[in-house]
Amino acid sequence: GNSVTQMEGPVTLSEEAFLTINCTYTATGYPSLFWYVQYPGEGLQLLLKATKADDKGSNKGFEATYRKETTSFHLEKGSVQVSDSAVYFCALSGRGNTPLVFGKGTRLSVIA
Amino acid sequence: GAVVSQHPSRVICKSGTSVKIECRSLDFQATTMFWYRQFPKQSLMLMATSNEGSKATYEQGVEKDKFLINHASLTLSTLTVTSAHPEDSSFYICGGRVRTGTEAFFGQGTRLTVV
């Protein structure tokens, strides 16, 4: 079945540091890939997505590239801020009734 | 756009009572709704998938008679936890998807505490 593996956290970074959160997937067919962010006590917000190989999703300074050859979708940001502290989930999905499959989440803490 | 409103955000109920959680898509038609439960170590467990007008499909191990899911319209899905017990205390999140989409848009979540 489909699955997502992302790096274990927590990750603690100083403000303005470079961020990478690794995500790899196993799937049949050609899934869409996503990064969601969850702030404390809140639901999930879609951060970015990519629907086919070599697509780059980007939003709010975050970006991730759909790499089919390495089955990866690593999240990156060049300079993190304290406000980026949250839990980040990598996910994949097909269409229709296919539910999203989530990784276990990576907690990011950014300190000033 | 793509806003999902989930209500209530927090609820405390007594053991043995039932509680209903509503999930509304405010600006799109959610042909498919997903209900997840989030555990303390942050992992998300899919409980069920529902399509508008159809019975929900429950994941293995999820009691369908305990967690009643209704998706009566393209903008509303409800989860009713019946005869709640303390072990049902958790964070519940709903998400909606349009017919042609792959992403889901999620509500703010509901923190359920059963005392």
Image (tube, coloured by chain):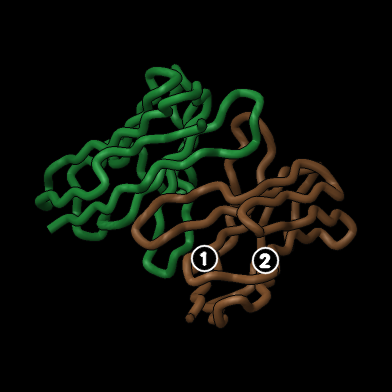
Chain colours: A brown, B green
Q: Residue at 67% across / 33% down in the picture?
A: A95
Work out whether residue A13 or residue A23 is closer to the camera in this orientation and state it.
A13
Mark 2 closeness class: few <14, some 14–19, many ≥20 residues within 10 Å: many
- Disc 2 secondary structure class: strand
Which residue carries the number 1 mark?
A84
**Residue B76 percent location from the top left of the image:** 37, 25
Do dots 1 and 2 share one subunit?
yes
Label total for image = 2
Q: Is residue B3 visible?
A: yes
Work out whether residue B29 or residue B56 is closer to the camera in this orientation and state it.
B29
Q: Residue furthest left?
A: B14
**Residue B73 percent location from the top left of the image:** 40, 18
The three-letter amino acid code for the residue at tag 2 is Lys
Q: Is residue A3 left or right of residue B109?
A: right
The three-letter amino acid code for the residue at tag 1 is Asp
Q: Residue at 47% across / 30% down in the picture?
A: B50
Give the answer, above or below, for where A93 lies relative to B15: above
**Residue B20 percent location from the top left of the image:** 23, 36
Chain for mark 1? A
- Disc 1 secondary structure class: helix
Q: Is residue B91 left or right of residue A6?
A: left
Which residue carries the number 2 mark?
A77
Q: Earlier in the sequence, mark 1 or mark 2?
A: 2
Chain for mark 2? A
Give the answer, above or below, for where A4 lies relative to B62: below
Q: Is residue A41 left or right of residue A66?
A: left
Image quarter of residue A26? bottom right
Q: Residue at 68% across / 46% down in the picture?
A: A49
Please say if the residues under marks 1 and 2 sit with CB atoms less than 8 Å apart. Answer: yes
Q: Is residue A1 visible?
A: no
Q: Is residue B101 left or right of residue B38?
A: right
